[in-house]
Image: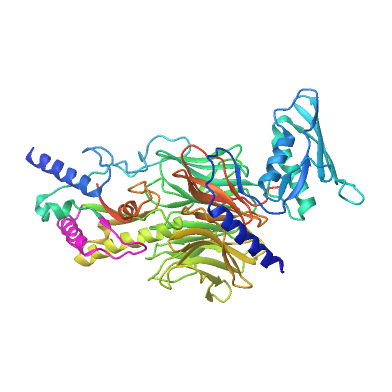
Amino acid sequence: MTMRKFASLLFVIFGTLFSHTTFATLLSMELTRGIAGAMPIVITPFSIQGVPPTEDMAAIISNDLKNSGRFKLSTSKMDDKVVGAVKEVGAGRYQVSFQLLEGKGASQPTVLLNRHYTVSGNELRALAHHMSDAIYLQLTGVRGVFSTRLAYVVKQGEKHILEVADQDGYDPRPILTSSASIMSPAWSHDGKRIAYVSFENERAAIYITNVATGARSLVSEFKGLNQAPAWSPDDRKLALVLSKDGLANIYIMDLASHQLTQLTHDYSYINTEPSWSPNGRSLIFTSNRGGNAQIYQLDLASKAVTRLSFDGSYNARASYTPDGNHITMLNRESGAYNIGILDLDTGVFRVLTNTGSDNESPSMAPNGSMILYGTQYNGRNVLSMVASDGSVQIRLPARNGEVQDPAWSPFLT
Amino acid sequence: MQLRSRVKNLMIMGCVLALSSCAAPGHKDQGQDGAYGAGDNSVQSSGVGQRSHFGDSAAGPNQSLAKRTYYFDYDKSEIHAQDKAAISGNADYLMSHPHAKVILEGHTDPRGSREYNVALGERRANAVAEFMKAKGVNPEQIRVVSYGAQRLAAPGRTEHDYQLDRRVVLVYVR
């Protein structure tokens, strides 16, 4: 059995199992579907010398690894183990060390990781995520996303907030607070800027905000639509949607000169949601030129357009996996809006969500392992994550108000 | 005084038909997104000035002039036959009042992709704008803005709510 077939089989099993499960009421990040054969790992409480830190390092690492869906917490001597120590060294600083030790199940148990750091107390949480990344990479061979961040829009009554939080939902910080709608946040590939659409003057405009300083600049305020910003891989250009000449068409703006190049020339149909291929040679976008919304690819050199999606009556908001081999998208089939993934080599399309809610805005983790998206839970808009092989599903912490339109950051370190 | 009460009546009719909150005369229409131009820490909001609803008996049947919300089918931007009289009535008003201006706000239901919905909302508003221009309205009197699914008319997730969400709202501006 090939790996892909095995993954499909797993998906079918879990899909069947969980489609009949009623989720319990939850107020925190919650793993609602875990992987069969998750790796067992022992994480012991860190030893503490001096003034105890405010953060429980072992608890943060445990949550990270457990919520990745790839690990399950164990107490067996046979399993790999994380041990650590935190020592207060004065002036609010700490010496932190941890080791990843092979379990007695290994033929010749060795020390896999042995790291030491000196940080200030307010860096301990970030350091714990950094340790999770190291452990995840060591044991899975894939770079972890525990130090990445999420951008999303919160709607509290008449207030709209563009917010950035750690990938586990902690430490939310406002980037923009407005009395008007905010939508479509998009991270630059260097992780330093976020482009978004704001309706603050009763018309759509695209702005870019520097995440660290909060400084922002107006990028696009043409007559009509100013929508769906998407950064080129080198962050020098922004693909965007304008309707200044009639209907929604896709353009590329050079960010240094603000010069526009029109890519689609369609005056009968919608063209929107451009997304760059990782190599920057093509864009995928949503168009209803075939009668209903489907995903198309535009080759930037030849300008040739190819239809990519064929499953379902509606496909939109597509984006590539980091390896460029798959695209994730919003898929409508039998009236249900789900998140799906298309294998560009085989043409095989798989639906990953089965929540029974109307899902929206899929955004890929920078390691391709998970897809962040908007859904509904208890009648409110919330964020959720699903593994790109369907094996893991996580709901993010409930917040006051509606949480929607998420975007996963690139690697930030 | 008589004109004032007539304006008020028209506004009430407009409110009922639009199924949305209307502002009192002389006050801003706050819409669903709240007070435009209100003080805000991080957004320097400049606003677009006062909005108000005009009423004028000379512009044709009151009923058609007051009907300023037009509904659409799922993923469609074709004007319903029963709305054409109302759109024509407002087109006549604009032609006889060359200084009057309207915003056509396009909206969709919450399902599907947010950005596709903004484009779809614009198509709906454009359909109404084109109909009015074909009647002879000066394009300078019309501005189109699409909010997609960002300002729902009905918060629920039933087919009835969706029908109320899929709309173009005609707003007179000063």
Q: Magenta part of the protein: which range?
A: B70-99
User: Looking at the picture, how far across and down is residue B38, in whole percent?
Assistant: 38, 36
Q: Is residue B72 magenta?
A: yes
- The colour style of the image is rainbow
In the shown orientation, is residue A84 left or right of residue B142?
right
Q: Position of residue B122 (x, y in %)?
A: 36, 59
Whether residue B52 is situated above or below residue A96 in the rendered picture: below
Left or right of A232, for residue A47: right
Residue A106 appears in the picture as rendered: yes
Q: Please identify the quarter of the rendering in which residue A7 is found.
A: bottom right
Which residue: 74% across, 36% down?
A: A58
Query: Which of the pair A337/A325 is nearer the observer?
Result: A337
Q: Is residue B25 magenta?
A: no
In the rendered image, residue B153, in percent from the top left (x then y), is placed at 32, 48
In this view of the protein, which residue sits in the foreground, A356 or B134?
Answer: A356
Instruction: Out of B38 and B168, give the one closest to the viewer.
Output: B168
Residue located at (73% from left, 39% from top):
A128
